[in-house]
Image (spheres, rainbow, N blue to C red):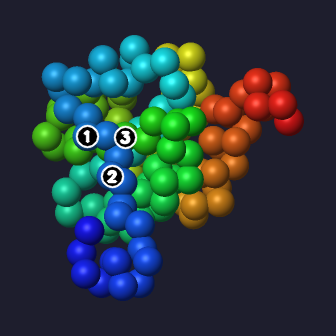
Amino acid sequence: MGFWNKLLGLEPQRLPVHIDDDNFEQEILRSNTPVVLDAWGPGCMPCKHLEPIIISLNARYEGKVKVAELNVAAAPRAASRLGVRATPTVIYFRGRREVERVVGLRGELYHRQIIEEDLLDRSAAGS
């Protein structure tokens, strides 16, 4: 942790799980926890704007939801398997199946609502 982070009391950022062609099936399709997968591309300005939102979701739902990122240029087989045609694309998995897909840039609240309503089991949480 850097000097300024200590001085300001900031937590170090926890980065999403990096997904590539080799670990896609294990990390996404065989995950025992719900997954939020951010499929992004280099040079994509909306993807750059989405990055802090994805990092924030990772911190907020740590231990409840796996947040992952996939560079479509570096993992073309995984991107093709998912049918990603544009970036950014955020895909939500629950029970190892896709339950929602968002193409384009949306705000954090939008993504949080999908996570709360479609990924997290409210009955198990006692809500």
Q: Give SS at disc 1.
A: strand
Say which quadrant the N terminus sits in. Answer: bottom left
Specify the label residue 18 is tagged with.
1
- Left or right: 125, with 69 as reference point: right
Q: In whole angstroms, how far apart are the C-alphas of marks 3 and 1? A: 6 Å
Mark 2 lies on residue: 15
Q: Mark 1 or mark 3, which is nearer the start of the sequence?
A: 1
Instruction: List x then y, in percent, for residue 124.
Output: 76, 24
Q: Which residue is mark 3?
A: 68
Q: CA distance from mark 2 to mark 1?
A: 8 Å
Count neighbours of disc 3 (C-alpha within 10 A) and say few if under 14, some if 14 to 19, many if 20 or more. Answer: many
Q: Type of residue at label 2?
A: Leu
Looking at the rendered image, the quarter that the C terminus falls into is top right
Quick check: marks 3 and 1 in contact, CB under 8 Å? Answer: yes
Q: Is residue 82 left or right of residue 19?
A: right
Residue 51 placement (x, y as % from top left) = 37, 61
* Picture coordinates of residue 37, whole percent (x, y): 41, 39
Q: Are marks 2 and 1 in contact (CB under 8 Å)?
A: yes
Residue 82: quarter of image:
top left
Return the residue nearer the eye: 59 or 71: 59
